[in-house]
Amino acid sequence: MFNQIRILKSMQTAFLLLAAASLACGCAAIKPKSQKTAVLGHLSAHEDCAELGPGQYMSYSWKSSGPLDFNIHHHEGGQIIEAVSKTGISSGSGNFYPKEKQYYCLMWTNKGMDEVDLFYNYKVEKAP
């Protein structure tokens, strides 16, 4: 885990240096992916949400140190409406195209006994 943290810190430093160089030279702005990490204990979940609507899509990818349940959902009238749902997997990626404007959430749940490290990123983009 310490190596993963060291790698993440190196990636953050490299990105900051690249962004500073871009600003210094007057280059076009870079729109980075949202790169994040989380640690999920036994029976815990992690959720990350973004507003999406028709004409947009979310590109996402993730990997974990153990099996997790994964879904993409939105909340409507006190209910959770799942658009994508997978169980017991350690990685995934894809493009999600919403049918309506909502706050859509990426959610991971650890149903195992061991702590699981999660590494993920996503980016909301204009649909082609």
Image: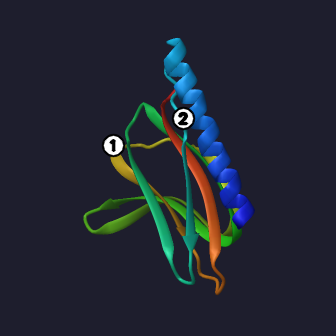
User: Of 110 and 71, which appears nearest the observer?
Assistant: 110
Farthest left residue? 77
Q: Compared to 75, does 19 lie above or below?
A: above
Question: Would residue 91 be visible to someone looking at this image?
Answer: no
| Quadrant into which the N terminus falls | bottom right
Residue 36 got which mark? Answer: none
Cα separation, mark 2 vs mark 1, equals: 23 Å
Q: Mark 2 points at which residue?
A: 32
At x 55% / y 20%, what residue is drawn? Answer: 22
Q: Compared to 92, does 89 lie above or below?
A: below
User: Of 121 and 17, which appears nearest the observer?
Assistant: 17
Q: What amino acid does circle 1 point to?
A: Lys
Q: Name the residue under label 1.
A: 101
Nearer to us: label 2 or label 1: 2
Q: Crowdedness of circle 2 by 10 Å Cα count: few (<14), some, many (20+)?
A: few
On the image, the x and y values in percent for residue 30 come to 53, 26
User: Of 50 and 83, which appears nearest the observer?
Assistant: 50
Q: Which of marks 2 and 1 is nearer the N terminus?
A: 2
Q: Compared to 12, does 21 lie above or below?
A: above
Q: Crowdedness of circle 1 by 10 Å Cα count: few (<14), some, many (20+)?
A: few
